[in-house]
Amino acid sequence: MRNLLDIMDLSVKELDDLIHTALDISKDPEKYAECCKRKKLATLFFEPSTRTRLSFEAAMYELGGNVIGFSEASSSSVSKGESVADTVKVVSNYADIIAMRHPKDGAALVAIRNAKVPVINAGDGGHHHPTQTLADLLTIYREKGSFEGLTIGLCGDLKYGRTVHSLVYAMSRYEGVKFVFISPEELRFPKYIITDVLDKKGIPYSETASLEDAIPQLDVLYMTRIQRERFEDRDEYERLKDSYVLTTEKLIPAKKDMAVLHPLPRVNEISVAVDDDPRAKYFEQTLNGKYMRMALILKLLGLDGSKEEPKESVKSIFLEGLRCPNNRCISKTEQELKQEFYSVDENKGIYRCIYCDTEVRK
Ligand code: NCD
């Protein structure tokens, strides 16, 4: 059974196939209108969403299927104290596939381990958001024709913004890609992804606090919202919330064919006047998200004719006494969940939490 926990669950070939299925769906939606007849998608959204939930639901309806679910934790038994594990065990009896969003890092792994049907991670805390990356990839592909050789600027909240984490994993698999991380010091891109992905593969990247300095070299500018709900320190959020505002003036030195992406919702980081610039692609991106989610549902339900590719499982070890230090990790709240870690460097005693990837030392 296939799930989508993070974007690395899909090989480059599978991403390519999804893009081509999505393009085909966009050209001839009628052809796909009955593919999911009698199938049900459950959307379990423990956290607010407009695009992700509604595009999943629209995707399933356009494939001829049905949708059940909830859009806030308060309307489910979670408000009575039910765990993620119990919730998905129950929903597995009612639906053929589950899309789940949860505020805790690592909640999607708990769901995958307990469900009897495929689970799609629709965002787990500040950790991963692979289906947003599918939307991003189709948008970049449509604008640029390929992923190779692109310089991608990621701007805003690179620490808590789960969309940029998944996007860097995905783009790091294409030749000649470079990254420019644009953020305040406090909201820098996670070190563990830099070490695991960029340093390991020798992918060039730079870090700067200045959007103005970075903009002229970029092929894609990916703006993000400062993630208010993930800050433990309110004053820090207040201090950082207006760090970047993309205006029409700031776009003057940018390449004429640079694409501006944003996962949305926008707060104030892109001025509304930019929407009229032909480089603004964020509303197209939301439509691309629906097509990619349609292609993904077909794949995970085994309705696209593709074969399952073998996947290496993460080495897991249970270490008595070690605890994940991340307060936003699902292991802090899920009942009787065992702490599990995988090793990064056993000789130096460096491990990471299997749920949220936070580093722990023994
Ligand atoms: C993003 C998310 O939920 O992480 N939104 C989305 O799914 N399109 C980005 C955000 O909330 O800032």
Image: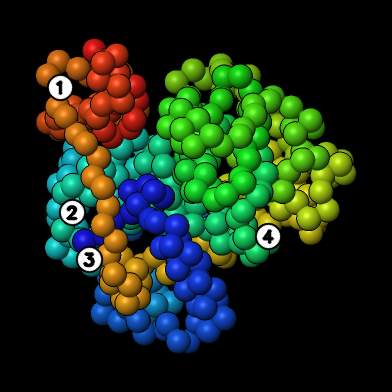
Using residue 58 as the reference point, say whether residue 235 is left or right of it: right
Element at badge 3?
Answer: loop
Q: N-terminal of the two: label 3 or label 4?
A: 3
Distance of mark 1 from mark 4, alpha carbons? 46 Å
Closer to viewer: mark 2 or mark 4 = 4
Disc 4 crowd rating (10 Å Cα; few below 14, some 14-19, many 20+) is some
Q: N-terminal of the two: label 2 or label 3?
A: 3
Using residue 69 as the reference point, say whether residue 226 is left or right of it: right
Q: N-terminal of the two: label 2 or label 4?
A: 2
Closer to viewer: mark 2 or mark 1 = 1
Classify residue 196 by image quadrant.
top left
Distance of mark 1 from mark 3, alpha carbons? 35 Å
The circle on residue 212 is none
**Colour mapping used in the image:** rainbow
Q: Residue, x 52% and y 78% (percent of image)? A: 24
The circle on residue 319 is 1
Element at badge 1?
Answer: loop
Q: Which residue is mark 3?
A: 95
Residue 313 shows in this picture: yes
Q: Residue, x 57% and y 65% (percent of image)? A: 287
Element at badge 4?
Answer: helix
**What amino acid type is highlighted by mark number 1?**
Leu
The answer to whether the residues at label 2 and label 4 have Cβ atoms under 8 Å apart is no
The response on whether ligand 1 sits within 8 Å of label 2 is no
Closer to viewer: mark 1 or mark 3 = 1
**What amino acid type is highlighted by mark number 3?**
Ala
Distance of mark 3 from mark 4, alpha carbons? 37 Å
Distance of mark 2 from mark 3, alpha carbons? 10 Å
The circle on residue 115 is 2
Vertical position of residue 187 compared to residue 8: above or below: above
